[in-house]
Amino acid sequence: MRHSRVQDHKLEGELFTIAGRPAGATGDFWSSLKRIKDKDDLFEPFVQCSVCDRLFVYEPKNGTTTLSLHVQNCLKQEKTLKSQPPISTAMKTTTTINSDEKRSVTIACAKYCAFDLKSCNSVDDQGFQQLCQKLIDIGYKYGGVRSGLPNAKDFLPDPTNISRTVKQLAEQYRVKLKDLLQQDLKKIKLFSVTLDYWKNENENHLRCICHGINLVVLHSLSACLLIDELITSCRVLSSHFKRCELNHLLPSILKHDNDTRWNSIYEMMNSISINYKHIEGVLDGRGGDESEKLDNIGHQLVTQLCDVLLPFKLGSERFQADLEPTLHLVLPWITKLKQHCTKDKEGDLLPIIQLKKELSLKLDEKTYLTQIHYIATFLHPITKNLSQLSSTKREKVHVDIMAEFANENQDVRDSDDEKDEIEQYLKTKMKFTNEDKLLGWWKKHSLIYPQLSILAQTLFGVPSSSATAERVFSSSGRILEKRRQSLSGDTVDDLLFLRNFRKI
């Protein structure tokens, strides 16, 4: 490895320096040298002088004469330099920042506040200014021009100026978004909007599947008395370990659930399951009635409950993706979850059997699949055969696709050609790897399947859940906090808009 690459890896955090001499080394000069280690805690064949930061190749077999002489010379030069006044005393001590440069810093600060959900006043904090000053010092140290040392306060704008700049940037980003949408609207006939609410009107709508699964799990857990009592006991145990600061005695900490995410119940139960033996040891060691906290928490029941909930957690996470299509996943995952709940395992405890029955019933009640879900599943090359459905239902899906073709086309087309396209798609062996993107695959095959390609582009723009909108809503909770309540509604909208569309 070259010296320059060592410096690069140090800046990237892949290598770091430590003080200390090799085993058996006795020379005093080692106190002025640092050794180089990698992320795996292995020494690299280099050392760095702590006086001048120069790198040297070092291997024990090559000797240390060169290193010793260099350190001696460096220490002599350092003593000479300390006895002389620094050149900075004869130079201008500050540098004037022009308006364009300060404006660029103001814009950067506005983006920092918007993208990272920071208060505009945070740039006025002493810690933030110390960070900026340190960065300036380092840039000044290694920069080519040294006309004078700038001050961080000269760069940083007033918080009010940042707030105004946030509004200006938001307007600029809105214009960018409008331009992008106008370009896309010239090419497409239909686009979808996912909202986080729905009016009680008799209009057809696509239910958000994550909300349905959330209701399925929560209602099923509360319907099983023994399971509900188990969860309550686990909450008490998790709170006890946190309150008494006992988590450091376990291989991993006990997690606590929260009211808004049912998945956190799984996380809590799983953390207790994998630490169960250690929890017993900790409670027994404390004596008294501590061990009684596990009386209502059976290890086998906790483990089996985690096994039941895990597929629901994995399915929910797949539905929440927002950078790739998810509508085609609904039918396969709902089918998988129903099979999971109707299949009893040998050794299942009675509460688990009861829970599976409740989950199976609630899946039928709370999840509603439309023909759009079936068509979307058909339009994925891997699940096109719709093996979950009977032959009658599969034929119904094909008929619905033909109807979609008719709706998409203004001109009259031969229905036999459209049927042939479906049959060709079904008969052809498809190659679809993990590296392939679904919309990219359809774009590549648009000449072979022109009608199906148009339909795929239309449907796969529809998400299966409202997770993206809910993430934006959650971000607003980080903006409006107990110590930050005076922001206007427009400012909150601007901050959220900049954060959500920061990549355009």
Image (spheres, rainbow, N blue to C red):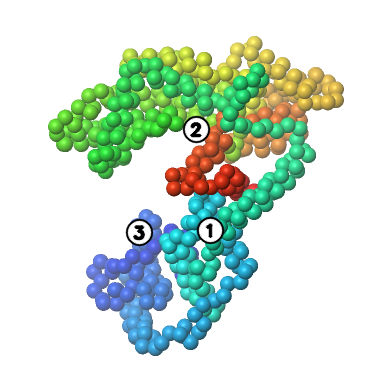
Residue 466 falls left or right of residue 445: left
> What residue is pinned by disc 2?
317
Observer-side mark, 1 or 3, equals: 1
| Of the image marks 2 and 3, the number of the one nearer the N terminus | 3
Q: Amino acid at mark 1?
A: Pro
Tell me the residue at 46%/44% (across/down).
481
Tell me the residue at 39%/20% (across/down).
221
* Residue 454 image point, x, y percent: 73, 31
- Dividing the picture into quadrants, the one containing residue 163 is bottom right
Q: Amino acid at mark 2?
A: Glu
Cα–Cα gap, marks 1 and 3: 46 Å
Observer-side mark, 2 or 1, equals: 1
- The reply to whether discs 2 and 3 touch (Cβ–Cβ < 8 Å) is no
* Residue 116 image point, x, y percent: 51, 50
Q: Is residue 484 visible?
A: yes
Residue 107 falls left or right of residue 423: left
> What residue is pinned by disc 1?
159
Circle 3 sits in a helix, a strand or a loop, which is it? loop
- Dividing the picture into quadrants, the one containing residue 462 is top right
> What residue is pinned by disc 3?
42
Residue that sits furthest to the top in the current view = 392
Q: Amino acid at mark 3?
A: Leu
In terms of depth relative to the viewer, which is nearer, 49 or 92? 92
Residue that sits furthest to the left in the current view = 288
Cα–Cα gap, marks 2 and 1: 39 Å
In terms of depth relative to the viewer, which is nearer, 13 or 254? 254
* Residue 3 image point, x, y percent: 46, 70
Circle 1 sits in a helix, a strand or a loop, which is it? helix
| Of the image marks 1 and 3, the number of the one nearer the N terminus | 3
Label 2 CA crowd tier, 10 Å (few <14, some 14–19, many 20+): few
Circle 2 sits in a helix, a strand or a loop, which is it? helix
Cα–Cα gap, marks 2 and 3: 38 Å
